């Protein structure tokens, strides 16, 4: 069961050959996916050999195999984590009942929407990142970008599998629509805001993989708790791939911080732009931007949808199974921010409608861990400065804080104050132009752009000067 069958046109461990109807639906979708990939996937590198890992089993040990692959020939497939025999629903009104192996009829629409919303983010990020190859800081980074891109493509496959296998004709229509929306398109945008933003440079990309992919981790983790077992198993395997995307973001920003600090020490200056690098003040602005965009992805503080998803047993809390409470939360409360005039206070609210906020809190704690590690790098260079996550109310477009302007330190500001100071907190056009000026491709083996330090080690035990992408 753990083994994946690569003898088939669509690699899978879901017994696809025993389900002819599903097999036909997916084989019809496959060429459309490839058309989308060729049109909207990484520009300019489709015919190059890339040193990619492919899943060969869903076991925790040794699921990956590394080899040279041209991206359109990547073996995208359908992989589910192992079934847990006798699994029961872990929360909500159906607590303790056997997990659903088929879609519960009364929740069909809600479940489909959850899957489509998750699925839509996967191709969106590929579209957002498609021009980055042209300005890669190294072959190592280029290869990591493409690894993430093919895996986001596979995450799309994962969601399309659920739609086609369990939602009949509606599911097939949704599968088509997932290939038709376009990130940033005015007429047919992607569903969620952050996935319509541009990723115009490598710093934005690293910030995206740190902050926005991390939203993905939390969404997938709470869907992995789902009472709908196929969704749970799909998400559990996706999380193993997602971990690599987060690694790329955290270590990538860490390497930028490292390089900046080295140059600050060597040049005895804060103004490392003169030395062709990114100053810490600019990094802080990009943190502010990507963090606030990503916080919005969790939705409003008070949400009947979130309460319903939970009560229905469709979407749990982060690490639901580890929590020691009644897993129903009907009488529980949760501390949520509240605005009183221009003061932000905390108030105990019913726990069920506060589940978005709770997931956002888990996410914030996780984001802080990486920031702490970046600050360790700064400290090691004996530089007296810390990077910070801005207040959760900073530059929000969704929920409570969308109505007000909040400074990074949490003070509520007047519009005039905000306008006067926002350039201190967010990337300006000049910052963006400077960043663009650094985006020159470095494609010589073992070399790295001046603004980013090399990683401590290569991919899969290979040396840093390995030809991670064969450009010849
Ligand atoms: Fe993904
Ligand atoms: Fe991801």
Image (cartoon, rainbow, N blue to C red):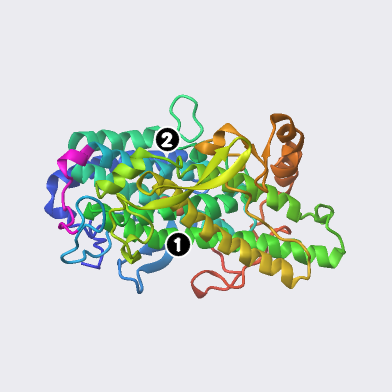
Residue at 55% over, 55% down: 210
Q: Gap in Å between the C-alphas at discs 1 and 2?
A: 23 Å
Q: Quadrant of the C terminus?
A: bottom right
Q: Residue furthest right?
A: 268
**Quarter occupied by the N terminus:** bottom left
* 365 relative position to 321: left or right: right
Q: Which mark is residue 243?
A: 1
> Where is residue 223 drawn, in percent x and y?
33, 52
Q: Are marks 1 and 2 in contact (CB under 8 Å)?
A: no
Asked if the magenta segment contains residue 38, the reply would be no
At a point 38% along the width and 68% down the height, the residue shown is 65
Q: Position of residue 393 (x, y in %)?
A: 59, 43
Q: Residue at x 39, y 51 (%)?
A: 333
Is 153 situated left or right of 346 in this image? left
Whether residue 74 is visible? no
Rendering coords of residue 11 (x, y %): 27, 57
Total tally of numbered discs in the picture: 2
Work out whether mark 1 precedes mark 2 in sequence or the reverse, and give the earlier one.
2
Compared with 305, 10 (above or below) is below
Kindly identify which residue carries mark 2.
191
Secondary structure, mark 1, is helix
Highlighted range, magenta: 96-108
The overriding secondary structure of the stretch rendered in magenta is loop
Residue 91: horizontal and vertical position, in percent?
Answer: 26, 55
Q: Residue furthest top?
A: 187
- Dot 1: few (<14), some (14–19), or many (≥20) neighbours within 10 Å? few
Task: State the mark number for residue 153.
Answer: none
Compared across the picture, whether 13 is left or right of 217 comes to: left
| Label 1 within 8 A of ligand 2 by Cβ | no
């Amino acid at each position: 069961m753990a083994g994946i069958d690569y003898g088939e046109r669509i690699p899978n461990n879901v017994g696809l050959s025993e389900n002819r109807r599903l097999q036909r639906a997916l084989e019809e979708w496959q060429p459309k996916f490839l058309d989308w990939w060729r049109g909207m996937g990484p520009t300019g590198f489709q015919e190059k050999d890339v040193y990619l890992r492919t899943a060969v089993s869903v076991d925790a040990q040794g699921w990956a195999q590394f080899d040279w692959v041209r991206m359109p020939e990547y073996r995208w497939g359908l992989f589910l984590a192992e079934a847990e025999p006798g699994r029961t629903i872990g929360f909500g009104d159906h607590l303790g009942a056997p997990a659903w192996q088929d879609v519960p009829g009364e929740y069909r629409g809600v479940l489909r929407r959850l899957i489509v919303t998750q699925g839509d983010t996967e191709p969106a990020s590929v579209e957002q990142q498609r021009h980055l190859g042209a300005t890669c800081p190294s072959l190592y980074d280029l290869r990591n970008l493409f690894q993430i891109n093919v895996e986001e493509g596979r995450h799309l496959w994962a969601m399309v599998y659920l739609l086609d296998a369990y939602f009949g004709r509606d599911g097939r229509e949704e599968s088509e629509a997932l290939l038709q929306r376009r990130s940033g398109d005015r007429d047919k945008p992607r569903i969620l805001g952050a996935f319509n933003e541009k990723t115009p440079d490598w710093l934005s990309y690293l910030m995206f993989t740190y902050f926005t992919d991390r939203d993905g981790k939390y969404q997938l983790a709470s869907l992995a708790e789902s009472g709908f077992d196929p969704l749970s198993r799909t998400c559990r395997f996706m999380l193993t791939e997602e971990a690599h995307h987060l690694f790329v973001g955290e270590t990538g920003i860490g390497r930028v911080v490292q390089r900046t600090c080295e140059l600050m020490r060597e040049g005895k200056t804060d103004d490392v732009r003169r030395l062709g690098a990114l100053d810490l003040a600019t990094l802080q602005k990009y943190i502010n931007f990507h963090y606030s965009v990503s916080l919005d992805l969790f939705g409003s503080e008070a949400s009947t949808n979130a309460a319903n998803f939970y009560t229905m047993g469709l979407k749990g809390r982060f690490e639901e199974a580890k929590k020691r409470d009644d897993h129903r939360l009907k009488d529980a409360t949760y501390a949520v921010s509240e605005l009183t005039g221009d003061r932000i206070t905390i108030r105990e609210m019913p726990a069920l409608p506060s589940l978005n906020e709770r997931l956002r809190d888990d996410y914030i704690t996780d984001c802080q861990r990486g920031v702490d590690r970046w600050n360790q790098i700064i400290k090691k260079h004996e530089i007296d400065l810390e990077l910070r996550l801005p207040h959760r109310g900073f530059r929000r477009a969704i929920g409570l804080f969308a109505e007000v302007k909040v400074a990074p330190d949490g003070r509520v500001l007047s519009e005039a104050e905000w306008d006067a100071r926002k350039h201190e907190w967010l990337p300006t056009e000049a910052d963006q132009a400077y960043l663009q000026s650094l985006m020159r491709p470095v494609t010589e083996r073992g070399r790295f752009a001046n603004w980013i330090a090399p990683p401590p080690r290569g991919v899969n035990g290979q040396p840093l000067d390995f030809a991670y992408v064969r450009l010849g």
